[in-house]
Image (spheres, grey):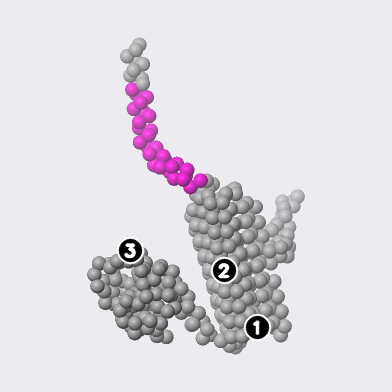
């Protein structure tokens, strides 16, 4: 697909500087782009590349003052990074819209229903009473269990397994290898030291505009629902345990784990490899640094780090003191020697 600068500017509400008919058919990094490619400049550290890039069109911030003239056609926008992301999203949607139809071999239960313009890839399985909305894309090798609902414009990538009773909203993207609705880790300890499995009878509810990365797992609730609220973004290799609630527009980076029945507020940010214990609450806007171990509730807007995690600012001060321990030890010994000398002189 080929687009010219004027068409792209209309999509991202930008202003063209240069040849509005300049055309591109692909994307490239500003330092590597070639003729016929579109790139962007958002980070000032990369400004040097704009003066000799071979890209045909560059999206830049409207506030950027260039030090010299450039060859590419420019499209100025309020926020180049956001505009470029919006353009990539639009392009991806156009590519996905070309995917339509049901490939063989695939299995669709007679009681399952699906809307218009769906794509169901080869070796996909759609269970009894499943409801698939309009424009849904289900890639090859995916499993959609009984009574699952998938809302309009959602994308289920290859090899995703969605267990029974799961409810997925609109514009949701679930990447390859992820498992939604597997049993929560519930076992009751017995007097003889063994463990008895607690049946997991709830489900998973994923609201609109959620993205779940590859090879993540979201467990079904024991009773009730494990809930991922609208706009949440989950990275690859994340574990969300039974009865967890993830708030609106919360983001969780790769390899993090959230234990059972913990509630994450809206706009929470959790770094990679962080671990959150069960039955606690992280307030709206809380931040957890990478590799932190959170063992108690965190107040709204508070940032924590470390294991066990505690106040971020205090932790940085402690780290600064730790780095100076050898120096401080040396000073203490010097003071001790001075004190001994002073006492000896008095005697």
Q: Are marks 3 and 1 in contact (CB under 8 Å)?
A: no
The answer to whether 340 is drawn above or below residue 69 in the figure is above
Residue with the mark numbered 2: 210
The majority secondary structure of the magenta stretch comes to helix
Give the quarter of the image for residue 176. bottom right
Q: In the image, residue 98 lies at what x, y percent?
A: 51, 86
Residue with the mark numbered 3: 44
Q: In the image, residue 274 lies at what x, y percent?
A: 52, 55
Q: Nearer the viewer, residue 323 or 62?
A: 62
The range drawn in magenta is: 311-338
The answer to whether 19 is drawn above or below residue 270 in the figure is below
Q: In the image, residue 125 lies at what x, y percent?
A: 64, 80
Residue beneath the point at 34% across and 23% down: 337
Residue beneath the point at 65% across and 83% down: 114
Give the quarter of the image for residue 188. bottom right
Q: Nearer the viewer, mark 2 or mark 3?
A: 3
Q: Is residue 150 magenta?
A: no
């Amino acid at each position: 697909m080929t687009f010219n600068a004027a068409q792209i500017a209309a999509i991202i509400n930008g202003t063209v500087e240069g040849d509005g008919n300049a055309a591109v058919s692909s994307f490239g990094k500003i330092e590597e782009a070639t003729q016929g490619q579109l790139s962007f400049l958002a980070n000032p550290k990369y400004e040097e590349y704009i003066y000799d890039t071979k890209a045909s069109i560059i999206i830049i911030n409207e506030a950027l003052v260039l030090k010299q003239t450039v060859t590419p056609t420019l499209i100025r926008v309020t926020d180049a990074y956001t505009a470029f992301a919006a353009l990539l999203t639009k392009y991806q949607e156009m590519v996905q819209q070309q995917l339509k139809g049901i490939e063989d071999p695939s299995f669709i239960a007679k009681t399952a229903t699906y809307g218009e313009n769906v794509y169901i890839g080869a070796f996909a399985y759609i269970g009894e009473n499943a409801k698939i909305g309009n424009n849904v894309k289900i890639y090859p090798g995916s499993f959609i269990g009984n009574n699952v609902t998938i809302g309009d414009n959602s994308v289920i990538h290859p090899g995703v397994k969605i267990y029974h009773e799961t409810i997925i909203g609109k514009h949701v993207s679930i990447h390859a290898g992820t498992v939604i609705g597997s049993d929560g880790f519930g076992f009751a300890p017995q007097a003889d030291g063994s463990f008895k499995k607690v049946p997991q009878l709830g489900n998973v509810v994923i609201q609109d505009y959620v993205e779940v990365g590859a090879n993540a797992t979201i467990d079904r609730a024991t009773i009730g629902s494990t809930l991922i609220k609208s706009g949440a973004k989950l990275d690859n290799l994340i574990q969300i345990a039974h009865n967890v609630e993830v708030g609106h527009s919360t983001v969780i980076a790769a390899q993090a784990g959230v234990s059972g029945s913990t509630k994450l507020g809206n706009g929470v940010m959790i770094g990679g490899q962080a671990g959150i214990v069960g039955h606690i609450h992280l307030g709206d806007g809380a931040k957890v640094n990478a590799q932190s171990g959170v063992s108690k509730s965190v107040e709204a807007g508070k940032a924590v780090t470390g294991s066990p995690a505690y106040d971020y600012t205090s932790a940085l001060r402690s780290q600064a003191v730790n780095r100076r321990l050898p120096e401080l030890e040396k000073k203490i010994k010097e003071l001790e020697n001075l004190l001994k000398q002073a006492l000896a002189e008095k005697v």
